[in-house]
Amino acid sequence: MPRPRRQPSHERCSPRVAGPGVLGKGVQFCVSLQTDKVHLGPEFASGAAVAEVARAAEAAGFDAVFVTEHPFPEQEWLDGGGHHALDPFVTLAVAAAATTRLRVLTNLCVVPYHNAYLLAKTAMTVDVLSGGRLILGCGAGYLAPEFAAVGAPFADRNDRFDDALRAMRAAWSGEPVAVATSGATHTMRPVPAQQPHPPLWIGGNSRRALRRAVELGDGWMPFPNPGSAAARRRTPELITVAQLAARLDEAHELEAATGHALRDVMFSPVGVDTYGTPGWDAAAFGQVVAELAAVGVTMLSVHFPARSRAEYCDLVAGFGAEVLAPAGGGTRP
């Protein structure tokens, strides 16, 4: 068992499966809205589908639903297992409108694809209209052809990502911001429902991504990545709990050096079969969740194998009944 994380000075999650439903107060679960399965048409890629899956997730006790972002992927990447996706913010707005307590998460938004101030306005709007339920999961991106297709420079994406995070935080303050490109002072209103801004969770497994999360974000979203995919995805291998624990030790060092602490860490259960498959083992799953919680993970993302909306909603409900309800999930006020 990896050694427990040192707790930052502010309140953190306690190591248990499915917390009481308040972000940052327990290990929680988020589930995909499945909008990457656009090839199945309105089964998942429709307003009715998004609303139905979101309501099913909320009823089952999930704490959040998530979507990805790929506005214009290249065919070679799609042929190799990539996927299309609906616009993340429009989709999450539909999910939020269909629910009352469910958090809505971009997993993740490729920030360097966007103008920082337009992205700040879009995110603020979703946060306001949802009553403060947006979590803005952000990443640098790694698909050079998609950057080129949307007219965004690729080589300097990390620097632009850092600059964008600072710019968005300034815009969300509602105070005047001097913008170099216009030579004028600008303001953005209204301010986000969550103050000072929606949680910024930073994706990526690299040292730079981890530093960005500590210095400019509120959470870190590493993802399971085998060594065979590290070069293609342009991010280091990360597949075991021990590897994650070592990276979080790096985070502690950065926290001590900067005076900033991560509030949340999101990861996916690894080394166990998915719920709804023949190899599912509830005890093994619970053990992995306990190990991840012990090293400091606060949000776990899951997905289920389904080719129809009805099947997916059944799996969501089953997971809620078998995993979340016994552990106290779904009690957010």
Image (cartoon, grey):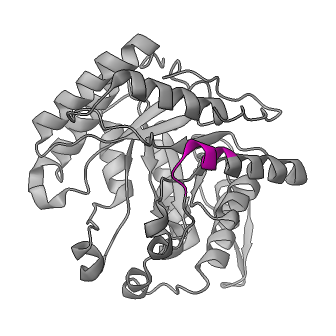
Q: Residue at left 22%, top 75%? A: 79
Q: How many callouts does the rendering have?
A: 0
- Side (left or right) of 87 relative to 207: left
Q: Is residue 42 magenta?
A: no
Magenta stretch bounds: 238-245
Whole-percent x and y of residue 157?
58, 79
Residue 97, horizontal then vertical, whole percent:
32, 38
Residue sitting nearer the eye, 103 or 310: 310
Q: Quadrant of the N terminus?
A: top right
Main secondary structure along the magenta-highlighted residues: helix
Front residue of 277/234: it is 277
Any magenta on residue 239?
Answer: yes
Q: Determine the image quadrant of residue 194.
A: top right
Q: Please tell me which residue is depicted at 13% across the width and 35% down the height of the picture.
A: 311
Residue ID at (36%, 48%): 92
Horizontal placement of 43 versus 241: left or right? left
Image vertical order of residue 325 relative to residue 91, above or below: above
Inspect this view and state whether residue 64 appears: no
Image vertical order of residue 215 relative to residue 56, above or below: below
Query: From this viewpoint, is residue 62 visible?
Result: yes
Where residue 150 sits in the image (x, y, percent)? 39, 82
Left-right relation of 258 to 309 = right
